[in-house]
Amino acid sequence: MQKTNDVIGLGNALVDFLVEVDENKLLEFNLKKGEMHLVEEEKAKEILEIIQQQELKIETASGGSSANTLRAIAFLGGKAILCGKVGEDKHGEIYVQQLENHGVSTKINKHYKTTGHCVSFITPDSQRTMSTYLGAALELYKEDILEEDIAKSKVLHLEGYQIEGPTKETILHAIELAKKHNTLVSIDLADPGLIRRNKEFLKELVMHHADIVFVNEIEAKEFTGLENEDAVRELGKHAKIAIVKLGEEGSLVFQNNKIIKINPFPAKAIDTTGAGDTFAAGLLYGYCQGWPIEKAGNLGSLMASKIVEQVGVKVNQLNVQELKKQIEEKTMIKIGIIGGSGLDNPNILKDSQDLEVNTPYGKPSSLLKVGKINDVDVVLLARHGRKHTIPPTQVNFRANIHALKEAGCTHILATTACGSLKKEIGRGDFVILNQFIDFTRHRKVTFHEEFPNGDIKHTPMAEPFDKTLREIFIKTCEELGLKHHKNGTVVTIEGPRFSTKAESHMFRSWNADVINMSIAPEATLANEIGIPYAAVAMSTDYDCWKEDEVAVTWEDVLKVFKENVEKVTNLLAKAIPKINNKDKVVLEKVEIEKEEDNKTEFDLKSTIRTIPHWPKQGIMFRDITTLLQNPEAFNYCIQKFKEQYQNKNINKIVGIESRGFIFGSVLAKELGLPFVLMRKPGKLPAETVAQEYQLEYGTDKVEIHKDAIDDGDNVLIVDDLLATGGTMQAACQLVEKLNGNVAGVAFVIDLPDLKGREKLLSYDVFNLVEFEGE
């Protein structure tokens, strides 16, 4: 069903009474400052009567956390719906009318109880303390929720206040409908007291149902037991997006394994009522429009700063066009480009000029060349100097990254030459890097010389290359028809020397894809300073592991890079406009996508039975029949293989008799590839080609149909177990005899003690589990 609405909210439909008091008044009513207190009808009447008798100034508005959020979303131009319940009274009529006047569609039914209300006491420090009588709001039932409304909405927004009382079942029903229709579930945990009373239920809700979670710093501490950054990271283990609101210090957003700091806008706070609700409105509105989360968070932060400068949540008094203009100006894109070998002097900038800068870490490698590419601001920096005079070890990476930060760069794109560690990554191929192994020894890879006052900083580095920028590179390569590899692990070595053969083979055994001398320090520092970073590596050589080629030289590297520099320039020129946040290039899916990294890893090893002394004394036989009897274990194997190879350039899968047939054939079906049998002699009916290999006593053979492999096929060979490696080595040689390329070899089990990998050093080896020393 088409998502025609932005946000549907369930909320306590409450009339807000805003009262300015000193802290003694809170003591008089026995209210704990800064929290929400549920009161019964008699107590609620008593408080209102005292306020009226003392002639305190009262402002009245239609309120409730969800209503505040939805009203602000509608004000911004979003489509918002509120489901709630009011009484058959004057306050109920006013409540509905005010929301509709603000552009919110209301699905609000009536009940014989009186309309609920919330008295917000505002103390001189702008903090609010709430006395809430829920009244008719408690009578919101499952029958009041229309499935069609949730199905047509991108986000279902809930307020934590509703988990107490009869509305709890209504909340769970709405979540069930949201899951059914791929509608994201957003929840504001609302109040530390509420969290204390319902912690276990809320944890269950967040862990299994919530996609977007809002808390303030006190609520975060109450819920997780952790402070700000640690708290948002903990919440982010379960939610797609986690937000910790820090009041006048801004907020923290955790998405895609990264913490994004949303800075505050200057404000002179008078009343913080609804500030958190309005922040949520800005973020949810922007998110539903496909904005990057930082831009959406900035809109929320700006709106909250405007709301606290007045009494009450009066979004209609704001200028929506001015707000959006201010956000566009704040989030203007400026791209830093770090050019590697062969890209030191690109002539692609318009209105360019040189800028000399200095940093606390010294001068960067070159002057900054600033200008525009396709109307996007760009800053170009030559990593090794414009005449390539700086060796890799002497590059001042800290100054380079800091200079780009100070120049206002919001993103960094890097290009580099690299050596290939995989046969299938040919000269001139592009590799969109997603991981690195830092093998440098003498680089300064942190801006922190010390942790002053115990302010410890450890930068998460699980995903060092920005996901969105990588997707833009991949999309652009596809559009330009450039041969590319969607993932790649780069080993960064110290340099300036190239690798020894022993090192090159070692890096291949680590399953690295390419090798260079610059990327790891750059990526590390960019992540530490908070700039999204991505790198595209161009393969210029095969390092020195490939026995049928001479070892790499600098002249070879430069020759290949110069031959392909135009491709690099075109890639950058076409990719850069996509990063401009005015173009919604990489829209996040509306359906739920829990991060795979947060899933508990399946214990595959425990499903494999070990049988001692079979088939002869001294052998520990690893029996996979128990694995095959476990559907979850078998599916895990196939999915892990699929994850490993789905983005590789493979067009055929070979299975080795006999257990390789089991895993290889199912994997081939999953990947939509042809499957080829490799059998013992005499088992295949048509003309075959054979490869002999050595056994402990004697020899054996494997055979394949002569027409099964075509020239240039990129082949993955699958078997269940790697022992001495003889069979797989022969299988690889047989594929190559038919002019195929061995793109990889895959096993369920590796027995490292038998040193099978030593026979496969020229190939990309992957396995799921190991039994070593057992």
Image (cartoon, helix red, strand yellow):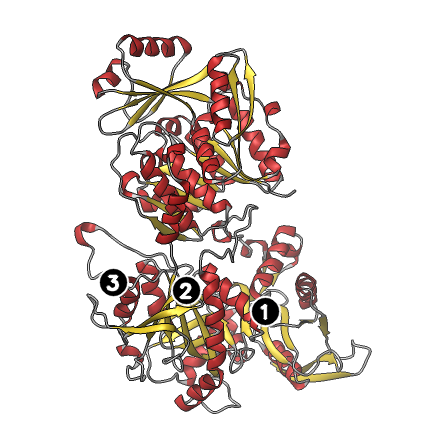
Disc with the residue nearer the chain's start (2 vs 3): 2
Distance between the Cα atoms at labels 3 and 1? 41 Å
Amino acid type at circle 3 is Phe
Could you say which is closer to the camera, residue 530 or residue 642? 530
Q: Position of residue 522 (x, y in %)?
A: 34, 68
How many numbered circles are shown?
A: 3
Left or right? Give the position of 592 relative to 197: right
**SS at badge 2:** strand
**SS at badge 1:** strand
Q: Which residue is mark 3?
A: 447
Q: Residues within 10 Å of mark 1 (few under 14, many from 20)?
A: many
Q: Which residue is mark 2?
A: 376
Q: Nearer the viewer, mark 1 or mark 2?
A: 2
Left or right? Give the position of 479 relative to 325: right
Rendered view: 554 above or below 121:
below
Q: Which residue is mark 1?
A: 746
Q: Nearer the viewer, mark 3 or mark 1?
A: 3
Distance between the Cα atoms at labels 1 and 2? 45 Å
Tell me, yes or no, if residue 225 can be seen here: no
Question: Which of the 4 image quarters holds residue 108?
Answer: top right
